[in-house]
Image: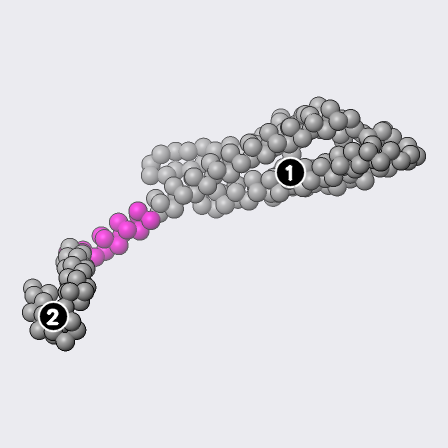
Amino acid sequence: MHRNLKSGLMYVDKQKKNLTEIGNVIDTWRFAVEREARNQPHFPSSNLRNIVYIDPITRLIEEKFNNRQLFGDGTESAIRIHLMIEGIRYEFHLNVVPLLIDPGFQAIMHSGHSSDYPSTGVFDLCCRHIINCMLTLEHNRTELDQKVKMVLQSRQKNLNFKALSSAGPFAGAFQENRIRSAIFNKVVSFFMTKFPISSMAGILLPLTLLRKF
């Protein structure tokens, strides 16, 4: 169960990593367009200036995690994680990021066949879709973190119960001794703040005798 959660976390983290890198490439691409428009130099039209950005994006899209796609058009089957925590069943779905279904992203990817840069409107559409996908991934990561926390808390409860059961009839006495020792230490600390060290021996001796009972 814990292994499935760990695999799910790694899958989401890989999606986030690649999506962040795709966003960085598109930002660089957009800044290049704005810089060229601002400086207004005349460059010969060529689709190569778009391919420079499309190639790394394509590589990031095609990467996989454990033979599973990171990105798609939303029709791909989801990863299902089944959990049983304290008798309650949970089922969590991790979907492929539907990056390729967005019209803006499709236009960006098809610009490799054109000698013109994508328009500002296309960049805007693409960036909004990437942000929405990132928000979905953040939500998935938070949900998985909560499930991991629930699993760890459940395991700790079981360990505490087993430790208490294995202690048998001595468990109560052990707990009682711990409480008595804690009270004794607090009393000693109190007297040490009220009386000089030279007189502490006479005070601590009867306290030490009482501690044994």
Q: What is the secondary structure assignment of the residue under circle 2? A: helix
Q: What is the secondary structure assignment of the residue under circle 1? A: helix
Residue linked to disc 2: 204
- In space, the residues marked 2 and 1 are separated at their CA atoms by 67 Å
Residue linked to disc 1: 19
Looking at the rendered structure, the kind of residue marked 2 is: Leu
Q: Quadrant of the N terminus?
A: top left
* Image position of 91 (left or right of 168): right
Looking at the rendered structure, the kind of residue marked 1 is: Leu
* Image position of 145 (left or right of 96): left
The residue at the point 68 percent across, 37 percent down is 23
The residue at the point 75 percent across, 37 percent down is 31
Find residue 64 and report its horizontal and vertical position in percent: 65, 41
The residue at the point 48 percent across, 42 percent down is 5
Quadrant position of residue 19? top right
Towards the viewer: 21 or 9:
21
